[in-house]
Amino acid sequence: MKAAFLDRDGVINEDLGYVGKIENFKFKEGIFELLKLLQDLGFALFVVTNQSGIARGFFNEEFVKKTNEFIIKTFNQREAVISDYFFCPHHPDDSCKCRKPETGMILKAKEKYNIDILVDATHPFAINASKNAIDVCKELDIKYVRFERKEENFPKEVVNRGEVGVGKWD
């Protein structure tokens, strides 16, 4: 299985801090087209995201699940299917194994979906906005594309002649 692992905040949506209301959730421009292209190229799409706002008391786990449902429904309406959504609810000081830069969420997806992490240079890969997410990729030897959180739109160079560009984007 070819898999693309997506960071949420800064990749799927604008990183506006701890968004506690779905109506304040803003998708990044170009994300629907990018994920539809990845899907058309045979990639299963997985979201892996730290959501420490739960542990910090900004919102509860039910809100994160409702937000995930909203994201999945919106992508489905745009014909891009999110295969699964993994999130870590822990505080950075909790020393859990799921919070990025730990590898727990990707390894859980690997186990659940029988993803061969070391297939070849084209898959799997990840699209990330945070240093913690990049560290996970380095740990598991996964190719990645990095977007700065301040980047408003996805660079056109990421999708070149129908091929997904993998490598560091700073």
Image: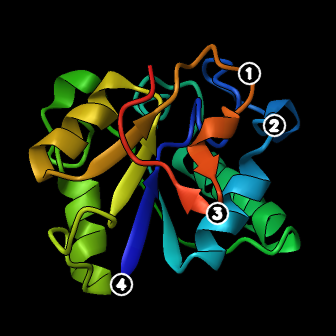
Helix, strand or loop at mark 4:
loop
Helix, strand or loop at mark 2:
loop
Give the distance between the C-alpha atoms of the residues marked 3 and 1, in whole angstroms. 22 Å
**Mark 3 lies on residue:** 162
Helix, strand or loop at mark 1:
loop
**Mark 4 lies on residue:** 1
* Observer-nearest of 11 and 68: 11
Which of the two labelled residues, at mark 3 and mark 4, occupies the earlier sequence position? 4
* Observer-nearest of 147 and 104: 147
How did the renderer colour the structure? rainbow
51 sits left or right of 137 in the view? right
Give the distance between the C-alpha atoms of the residues marked 3 and 4, in whole angstroms. 19 Å
**Mark 2 lies on residue:** 29
Give the distance between the C-alpha atoms of the residues marked 3 and 2, in whole angstroms. 19 Å
Q: How crowded is mark 1: few (under 14 residues within 10 Å), some or many (20 or more)?
A: some
Q: Which amino acid does label 1 sit on?
A: Glu
Give the distance between the C-alpha atoms of the residues marked 1 and 4, in whole angstroms. 31 Å
The x, y position of residue 158, in whole percent, is 58, 43
Which of the two labelled residues, at mark 2 and mark 4, occupies the earlier sequence position? 4
Give the distance between the C-alpha atoms of the residues marked 2 and 4, in whole angstroms. 27 Å
The x, y position of residue 138, in whole percent, is 16, 40
Q: Tell me, yes or no, if residue 49 can be seen here.
A: no
Which of the two labelled residues, at mark 1 and mark 4, occupies the earlier sequence position? 4
Q: Which amino acid does label 2 sit on?
A: Glu
